[in-house]
Image (spheres, helix red, strand yellow):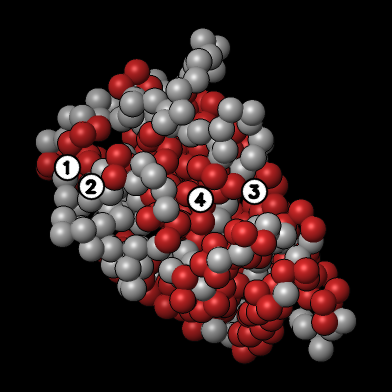
Amino acid sequence: MNAKRASYSTFAEDSPGRFYREAESLERPLFQRDRDRVVHSTALRRLKHKTQVFVSHEGDHYRTRLTHSLEVAQIARSISRMLGLEEDLVEALALAHDLGHTPFGHAGEEALDACMKPWGGFDHNAQTLRIVTRLERRYADFDGLNLSWESLEGLLKHNGPAIDADDRAARTVAAEGLPAGYKDFEHFEDLKPTLYASAEAQVASIADDIAYNAHDIDDGLRAGLFDVIDLADVPLAGTALNTVLSSYQNLERSRMVHETVRRVISAMVGDVVKETRKRVTRAKIKTADDVRQLGKPLVGFSPQLAENNRVLQLFLSRRMYKHERVRDIMGRAQRVVTQLFEAYMTDQEALPESWRLNSELEQSALKARHISDFIAGMTDRYALEEHKRLFDLDRLFS
């Protein structure tokens, strides 16, 4: 439990509640139930076999979307506790933020977005909202998870406001307009899409960045895409590595890597907490509404660390995400997604029987979104199995 809650944190008693009214539990508060519903969702379990950077067949020790989400939740909860925020809400958002990801990571998303261009495109954040409000079918009284207003707001605004004051899609959401997954949500306007989200949602978002960067260092080293010495001149990572090398003599490589990565995380977390406290004081933030009305993020890195993080991201982009080995396997993965989409659109008999539409519902837009939902929900392994079933070809290895 937090020793002291910040006045600008989110309080359950102030919540508008859920869009579908249901009796709340006296034993489990509002945001704890949100977190629990995410934990027990089918979409979260599927993340176990969805790519972070490396396709699952490349090794059991690389991070998946599930292990990444768990690490985001741990970092987010630590920041939340230091800032006096609502920890259950932060954890719910951290665990849910990647539910909408396709198989094969961002490569799969790019392929599916290209396939869906005539019908509003595909965006994994919008798909997350679609999952928690429509596609999870577990409860007798409603579709989705019926999460609280604050949880839905945080997922909608994972990267900031969804639209600007002139009702144009925010640049961080979509360059070509608001994703269909947002437009289709009947309560979209009720989530105040032009405002920033709560401090808790902002913490979950920056924890995502911290986990992504720090742990991709670990996976990149494990995969041999770059070596420890290559980090020496990279901000954050180089500083952490030099500290480790000066503190320990003849340290085995695996321990050296771990000690470096955990120092990177600690430095970034410490900076976020310090900088956010400065912004709270400077802007005289008193309430959760003050956070939303600020017009810019409350939670963030200091200017110096933000620049160091930018340089670290450039290093990872050049040496890892754009590495020939990664690009090759992801190019093949994109062809799997594209060919599956084309096969299902051409002949819906190719779909599993439970996913076939009634003939009267087979309008192209509805059919395309339905197929997009099916593919987005696939694990890497299932997508490969489907591709092999339809084409008798293992695209990743051929």
Q: Position of residue 342 (x, y in %)?
A: 66, 79
Q: Position of residue 219 (x, y in %)?
A: 64, 67
Q: Decide which of tag 2 and tag 4 comes sooner along the chain.
A: 4
Q: Which mark is residue 130?
A: 4
Residue 52 visible in the displayed image: no
- Circle 3 crowding by C-alpha within 10 Å: few under 14, some 14–19, many from 20: many
Q: Residue furthest front?
A: 360
- Circle 4 crowding by C-alpha within 10 Å: few under 14, some 14–19, many from 20: many
Spatial separation of the CA atoms under disc 1 and disc 2: 6 Å
Q: Decide which of tag 1 and tag 3 comes sooner along the chain.
A: 3
Residue 223 quadrant: bottom right
Q: Nearer the viewer, residue 58 or 366?
A: 366
- Marks 1/2 in contact by CB < 8 Å: the verdict is yes
54 relative to 74 in the view: left or right: right
- Circle 2 crowding by C-alpha within 10 Å: few under 14, some 14–19, many from 20: many
Spatial separation of the CA atoms under disc 4 and disc 3: 11 Å
Spatial separation of the CA atoms under disc 2 and disc 4: 20 Å
Q: Which residue is mark 2?
A: 195
Local secondary structure at mark 1: helix
The mark lying in front, picked from 2 and 4, is: 4
Local secondary structure at mark 4: helix
Q: Is residue 63 above or below residue 287?
A: below
Local secondary structure at mark 3: helix
The mark lying in front, picked from 4 and 1, is: 4
Q: Position of residue 37 (x, y in %)?
A: 59, 33
Q: Which residue is mark 3?
A: 43
Q: Amino acid at mark 4?
A: Arg
Q: Decide which of tag 4 and tag 1 comes sooner along the chain.
A: 4
